[in-house]
Amino acid sequence: MPPKKPTPAPAAATSTSSNGARIPAGTTMLPISKVHKIIKADKDVRLCSKEAIFLISKTTEYMLGKVTQQSYTQARSQKRAKTVKYQDLATVAQRPEFFYLSDVVPHTLPLKKALAIRQKMQEAAEGEGEEEIEPDTVLGGGKAEEEGGEHVPEDGEGESGAASSPNAVEEEEEEEEGSEEGAGMDVYR
C-alpha cells in the first residue's frame, strides 16, 4: 500500500482586491487604526465597536471600488481607456447612488461663469440684487446654462479657464493679488 499523502489544510478564506492581490478574510486595505481615529474625531459618535469600525472600513473600500469602476467605465465611454479625468468622477458623482458625493466632486465651471455667479450672490446678500440665487441650483448638479439659454461648456469642452475646484475663484484672486509672502509655492487647503 502506498504511503498516504498529507492533505493540505483548507486555506483561509480570501478575497481579491481590484489589483488582483489576495487579501485574507478579516482584514482590510484601509488601516483600522486610521479609520478609528477618523471616527473618534466625529463629536456625534461616542462609542464605536471594533466590528463596526471593520465594517465601515470594508464598506468604504467597496464604495471606492464602485466609484473607481464606474469612473473608468465613463472614461471608456469617452474613448479614453487609460485616463480617468476629474470630469469622469464628477459625472459619476451626479448619479443617484452617489448623491452624497455631488457636493464633494462638483462639475467644473468656467472662471467667468463662477465669478458672475459669485457677484450675483453677493449682490443678493446685500439686498441690491432683484432676484435671489441659490448656489445649489447653479452648482448642485446637471449642466448649467447661461441666461440667454446657451450651453456652458464643461471641463474639456472648450473655453479655457475652467474652475477646477470649488475654491478656484478664491485661489485665482489670491494669485492675482501677487503677495510676496510664499511666492512660488502652492498652498493646499
Image (cartoon, grey):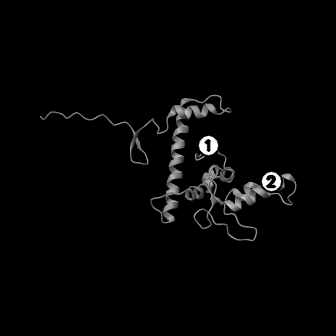
Residue at (60, 33) in percent of width and height: 39
Residue 6 percent across, percent down from the top left: 22, 33
Residue at (65, 34) in percent of width and height: 42
* Front residue (pair 187, 148): 187
For marks 1 and 2, the one nearer the N-term is 2
Q: Quadrant of residue 144?
A: bottom right
Q: CA distance from mark 1 to mark 2?
A: 29 Å
Query: If the image is split into quadrants, where does the C terminus sit?
Result: top right
Residue linked to disc 1: 182
Question: Badge 2: how crowded within 10 Å, few (<14), some, or many (20+)?
Answer: some
Amino acid at pointer 1? Gly
Residue 154 percent across, percent down from the top left: 62, 63
Residue farthest along the left direction in this orientation: 1
Amino acid at pointer 2? Gln
Q: Secondary structure at mark 1?
A: loop
134 horizontally vs 3: left or right: right
132 horizontally vs 75: left or right: right
Residue at (66, 60) in percent of width and height: 109
Residue 132 percent across, percent down from the top left: 82, 57
Q: Secondary structure at mark 2?
A: helix
Residue farthest along the front direction in this orientation: 180
